Amino acid sequence: MNKKTIAIVSVLLGILLIGVISASLLTYFGKITGSVEVSAPVFYATDIHIQGDVPTVIYAMSTNEVPDNNTAFNLTDGENIIFATDSLGVESFYPPRFDFNIKAKTNNESGRDLFIEFWTTNENYEYKDKICETKITLTNTINYANKGGSCSDSSELNLNPSDRFAMKISGSGMDSWYSIRIGGPYTPDKTTHMRVTAT
């Protein structure tokens, strides 16, 4: 074997050795990771009736898809409309923040509140835990207005895979009615929905 061949073999062995050492260090210290951007799920209210009748009616929510149907739901004080997601399929959930938009109007010019509660339910849509609650004030009586808000909880959620999120909307207990509109042709941020992110 001449000197040139010996030199080439030495270089190849050196590269191989460096590769083995690097692989060993990588295995020891962990994996190569990169950063990825994950969008928070958005749940849109739909007119798909799940169960119940006045005073409490439950409708489905679609995930990341605005429903085609443009529908208005009317409720009076003492009635509730609940929009519930599909089963979440997880056993825990980071401390949640719910950002929401309600497209609504009322018949009372002096202003009326809608109370918004966020719950976990079981697979049969029975309440489990209230996560947080807030309210919006409506003063518009002719045109629908977009009323946004948020509420959050600082605790991680312990769930069953069949559990769901639910957004409960209720009147403020006075002699008023409310109309809530869902679906297209509005842009995604201008229809009734909730987005779930980490606090």
Image (cartoon, helix red, strand yellow):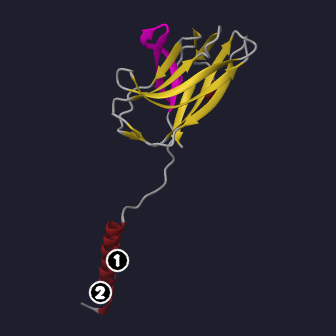
Q: Quadrant of the N terminus?
A: bottom left
| Distance between mark 1 and mark 2 Cα atoms | 20 Å
Rendered view: 40 above or below 49: below
Q: Can residue 53 be found in the magenta stretch?
A: yes
Quarter of the image for the C terminus: give it: top right
Q: Amino acid at mark 2?
A: Thr
Q: Which residue is mark 1?
A: 18
Q: Does 148 lie within the magenta span? A: no
Up the image or down, 187 lies above or below 81; here it is: below
Is any part of residue 192 visible from this angle?
A: no
Q: Residues within 10 Å of mark 1 (few under 14, many from 20)?
A: few
Closest to the observer, 138 or 175: 175
- Identify the amino acid type marked 1: Ile
Q: Is 58 in front, or is 65? A: 58
User: Residue 100 has which mark?
Assistant: none
What is the x, y in percent for residue 166? 47, 25
Among all residues in the image, which is located at the extreme right?
A: 110
Residue 161 horizontal side relative to residue 50, left or right: left
SS at circle 1 = helix
Judging depth in this view, the residue of 189 and 196 nearest the camera is 196
**Which image quadrant for residue 101?**
top right
Decide if residue 166 is on the left or right side of residue 133: left
Q: Position of residue 32 (x, y in %)?
A: 40, 61
Whether residues under marks 1 and 2 lie with C-beta atoms below 8 angstroms apart, the answer is: no
- From this viewpoint, which residue is outermost toward the front? 173
Packing grade of label 2 (10 A; few <14, some 14-19, many >=20) is few
